[in-house]
């Protein structure tokens, strides 16, 4: 698979005509620039073909009551606002859409998402409150179910509410201490899947060094306290809970140069009241590294890798350690046409995951995709094809699948 994709990319590059005016759409960021005012409303229509909707074997599809091959129509309206005012800044990102399947009508569902952030100067500090809400059908690649509860193995709508706040003090450049605290509440609408409902409290602090030619270098510590509201299988008679603590170093160098880098390295400690013999130990190094390189204004290379301990959205487990690797190449064929090829791998290990017909303890997902986009003024037309393969320790969830996406969107800007 990888050799074939590399050959395709190399051959395509040799055939690309030179266009002096062509330029890559994603230009380098400048982290210290004040954002310009923008209000953009985008309406789009996606037609999505999927050869494996159930994200598993044919036996898994039959047990879920899902027809594997299907086409989905997904109309969406999205609003993005950036509103600077004096020293303050307000941003709003929201979208509303609907997924309509041609065959799997039980998966038809609304998609709602909104996030508001602001930065408000108060004395020599900047206060940054944030609110978010989302509601969606969980992708079946993330969804298991307790034994015997088949309805929870397919239809499961997840609602997430977030309230976060941060404060940073000090001069514009130099040493700047900061702190944050937040609350996240996750709920589902399927009775059999409610053991994965959680409440999280997040808090932490950092000491930042800020310089216009260096970027931001930060020493940080943060913690997540997670309570599973309905999960008692790990703690007989009382609710399950876990704490995840990280401490480390972060570097952010998005300075508008051709090479952009954001990287963090930390040590993670998982505190759980249950540590039976043979339980996986997730303590150790975590990281998050992303880099972009812009060459000649037409070619953009992006690489990313991260490892983190998090919660499982749909499989019965206490925690998950996920390691991701991804890379992409974007090339401006002409001033209006851009092609992007990407590959990724995600490895997951589930801690205290009970053996069951609809459970797993580890899996690996490989994805390769290529996208062609045409943009003229406010209209964007794109085609995307992708291939996925998952290997796990439960044959029900092993699969190979192909997807194709046709999308057209129109952006109203003010």
Image (spheres, helix red, strand yellow):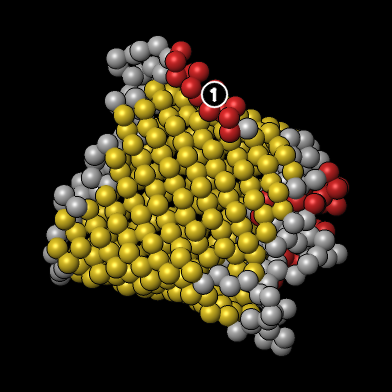
Residue 105 seen: no
Q: Residues within 10 Å of mark 1 (few under 14, many from 20)?
A: few
- Residue at the bottom extreme of this rendering: 237
Q: Depth check: 274 or 237 in front?
A: 274
Judged from the image, the secondary structure of the residue bearing numbered disc 1 is helix
**Residue 211 in the image: above or below residue 185:** above
Residue shown at 68% from the left, 75% from the top: 278
Q: Is residue 207 left or right of residue 44?
A: left
- Near-viewer residue (308 or 118): 308
Counting the numbered discs, the total is 1
Q: Is residue 330 visible?
A: yes
| Rendered residue at 78%/40% (across/down) | 68
Going by the picture, which residue comes out furthest to the front? 3
Give the position of the N terminus as an image quadrant. top right
Which residue occupies the foreground of this view, 320 or 284? 284
Q: Is residue 398 left or right of residue 335?
A: right
Give the x, y percent position of residue 307: 49, 58
Give the position of the C terminus as an image quadrant.
Answer: top left
**Residue carrying label 1:** 7
Residue nearest the viewer, comparing 66 with 59:
59
Residue 402 on image: x %, y %:
68, 33
Left or right of 143? Residue 135 is left
Point out residue 354 in the picture as x, y percentages from the top left corner: 75, 70
Residue at image location 64% in from the left, 81% down from the top: 275
x 61%, y 37%: residue: 74
Does 258 sit above or below residue 142?
Answer: above
Residue 205, picture quadrant: bottom left
């Amino acid at each position: 698979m990888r050799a074939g994709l590399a050959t395709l990319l190399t051959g395509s590059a040799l055939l690309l005509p030179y266009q002096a005016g062509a330029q890559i759409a994603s230009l380098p960021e400048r982290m210290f620039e004040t954002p310009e005012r923008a209000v953009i409303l985008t309406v789009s229509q996606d037609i999505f073909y999927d050869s494996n909707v159930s994200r598993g074997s044919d036996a898994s599809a039959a047990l879920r009551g899902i027809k594997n091959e299907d086409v989905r129509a997904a109309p969406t309206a999205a609003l993005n606002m950036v509103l600077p005012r004096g020293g303050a800044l307000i941003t709003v990102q929201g979208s509303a859409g609907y997924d309509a399947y041609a065959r799997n009508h039980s998966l038809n569902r609304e998609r709602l998402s909104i996030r508001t952030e602001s930065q408000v100067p108060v004395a020599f500090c900047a206060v940054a409150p944030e609110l978010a809400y989302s509601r969606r059908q969980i992708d079946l690649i993330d969804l298991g179910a307790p034994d015997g509860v088949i309805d929870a193995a397919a239809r499961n709508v997840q609602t997430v509410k977030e309230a976060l706040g941060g404060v940073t003090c000090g001069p514009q450049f130099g040493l700047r201490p900061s702190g944050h605290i937040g609350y996240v509440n996750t709920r589902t609408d399927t009775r059999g899947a409610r053991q994965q409902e959680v409440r999280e409290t997040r808090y932490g602090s950092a000491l930042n060094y800020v310089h216009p030619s260096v970027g931001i270098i930060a020493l940080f510590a943060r913690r997540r306290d997670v309570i599973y509201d309905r999960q008692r299988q790990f703690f007989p008679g009382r609710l399950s809970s876990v704490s995840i603590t990280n401490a480390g170093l972060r570097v952010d160098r998005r300075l508008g140069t051709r090479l952009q880098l954001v990287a963090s390295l930390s040590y993670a400690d998982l505190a759980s009241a249950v540590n039976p013999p043979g339980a996986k130990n997730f303590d150790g190094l975590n990281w998050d590294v992303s880099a972009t390189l812009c060459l000649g204004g037409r070619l953009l290379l992006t690489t990313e890798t991260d490892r983190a301990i998090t919660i499982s959205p749909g499989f019965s487990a206490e925690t998950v350690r996920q390691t991701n690797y991804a890379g992409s190449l974007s090339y401006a064929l002409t001033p209006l046409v851009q092609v992007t090829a990407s590959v990724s791998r995600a490895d997951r290990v589930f801690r205290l995951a009970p053996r069951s017909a609809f459970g797993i303890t580890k899996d690996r997902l490989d994805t390769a995709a290529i996208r062609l986009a045409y943009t003229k003024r406010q209209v964007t037309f794109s085609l995307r094809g992708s291939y996925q393969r998952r290997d796990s320790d439960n044959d029900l969830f092993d699969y190979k699948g192909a997807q194709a996406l046709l999308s057209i969107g129109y952006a109203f800007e003010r």
